[in-house]
């Protein structure tokens, strides 16, 4: 462990001397319930700490990370993010994964040209499309994922080089290239690109990524949303989520009701005719602290989920604490 932490200490020390903006951030999700896989296996509901034991429970994955940015001159900033998960029910780090910063570990440069990053990071599809899921891609209950039609449906990549453009009259573009994943059989290098247009209460995005392994599927997704004030709605279509041959449509809405956010997502895969429904309610109960209730049902086996029900009742605490100078 000491060998893993020494390079980090050197990095933080160097950035500290350059008057960097440094912060420790993350979230803790404590919940009671079970996901659809557990329900299909006739397992009982229990307490979870946000994706503990790799079981994808609760709403969000408990995580902690370090991030920083420093001015290096000529209008450029050097940036980094190091983030770990693999946190068990007792909030111990590293039980499930040998790599300490296995969730995010990237560095890059930003300026008037946009931003360039290299390392392990969220895929272009996830970054471009994630905001169209109004319940934060719930671990236990996501209808869009469980039905196999999530427009954000490609996960993190290693050896990932990405470019994010500045906002150009409402348009933002993002492109990426990732080398072969060591943990994937018959892996292939993958390219990806996404484009978003946002104006006022309207937003629309389109994204694509090439297959990540021989015999896999290319991925495409499109989504749009509009905020009417009393309710925000979305519609999406995806093809090849997580390398599966399925494709289908997603719908959703969220509305403020008596201080709560109340919403629903519905997804249907045209290939299997599997449909999933998700209902969610959440509210900020203290500063940076949120209570939530998520429920989902899948009517038949899909490419990514068995038939069953899932739910989670929990609390999320979010923190972002700058280092003192």
Image (cartoon, grey):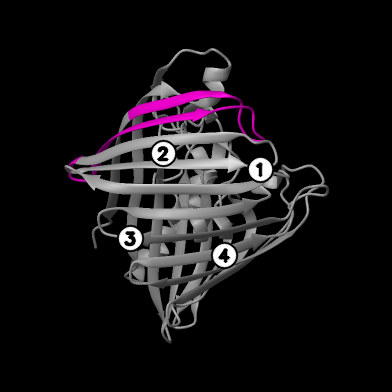
Which sits earlier in the primary sequence, circle 2 or circle 4? 2
Q: Which residue is mark 3?
A: 227
Which sits earlier in the primary sequence, circle 2 or circle 3? 2
Q: x, y percentage for residue 70?
A: 38, 71
> CA separation, marks 1 and 3?
28 Å
Is residue 215 visible to the viewer in this orientation of the structure?
Answer: yes
Which numbered disc, 2 or 3, marks the residue closer to the eye? 3
> CA separation, marks 2 and 3?
24 Å
Q: Secondary structure at mark 1?
A: loop
Q: Do tag 2 and tag 4 residues touch (Cβ < 8 Å)?
A: no
Q: Nearer the viewer, residue 191 or 25?
A: 191
Q: Quadrant of residue 233?
A: bottom left
Residue sitting at x 33%, y 71%: 200
- 313 above or below 199? above
Marker disc for residue 206: 4
- 284 above or below 40? below
Q: Which residue is mark 2?
A: 60
Q: Do tag 4 and tag 3 residues touch (Cβ < 8 Å)?
A: no
Q: Quadrant of residue 221?
A: bottom right
- Is residue 118 found left or right of 297 in the rendered image? right
Q: Do tag 1 and tag 2 residues touch (Cβ < 8 Å)?
A: no
């Amino acid at each position: 462990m000491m060998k893993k932490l020494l390079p980090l200490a050197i990095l933080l020390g160097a950035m500290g001397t350059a008057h960097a903006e440094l912060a420790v951030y993350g979230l803790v999700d404590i919940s009671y319930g079970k996901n659809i896989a557990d329900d299909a296996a006739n397992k009982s509901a229990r307490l979870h700490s946000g994706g503990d034991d790799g079981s994808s429970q609760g709403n969000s994955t408990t995580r902690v990370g370090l991030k920083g940015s420093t001015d290096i001159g000529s209008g450029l900033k050097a940036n980094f993010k190091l983030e770990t998960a693999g946190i068990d029910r007792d909030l111990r780090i590293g039980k499930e994964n040998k790599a300490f910063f296995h969730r995010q570990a990237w560095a890059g440069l930003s300026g008037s040209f946009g931003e360039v990053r290299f390392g392990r990071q969220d895929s272009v599809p996830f970054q471009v499309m994630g905001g169209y899921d109004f319940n934060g891609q719930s671990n236990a209950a996501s209808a869009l994922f469980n039905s196999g039609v999530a427009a954000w449906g490609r996960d993190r990549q290693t050896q990932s080089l990405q470019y994010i453009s500045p906002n150009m009259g409402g348009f933002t573009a993002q492109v990426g290239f990732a080398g072969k994943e060591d943990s994937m059989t018959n892996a292939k290098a993958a390219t990806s690109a996404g484009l978003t247009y946002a104006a006022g209460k309207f937003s629309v995005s389109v994204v694509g990524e090439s297959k990540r392994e021989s015999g896999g599927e290319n991925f495409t997704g499109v989504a749009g949303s509009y905020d009417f004030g009393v309710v925000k709605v979305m519609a999406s279509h995806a093809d090849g989520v997580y390398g599966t041959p399925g494709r289908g449509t997603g719908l959703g809405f969220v509305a403020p009701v008596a201080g709560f956010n109340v919403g629903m997502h519905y997804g249907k895969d045209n290939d299997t005719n599997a449909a999933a429904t998700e209902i969610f309610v959440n509210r900020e109960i203290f500063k940076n602290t949120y209570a939530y209730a998520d429920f989902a049902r899948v009517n038949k086996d899909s490419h990514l989920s068995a038939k069953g029900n899932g739910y989670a009742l929990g609390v999320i605490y979010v923190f972002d604490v700058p280092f003192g100078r």
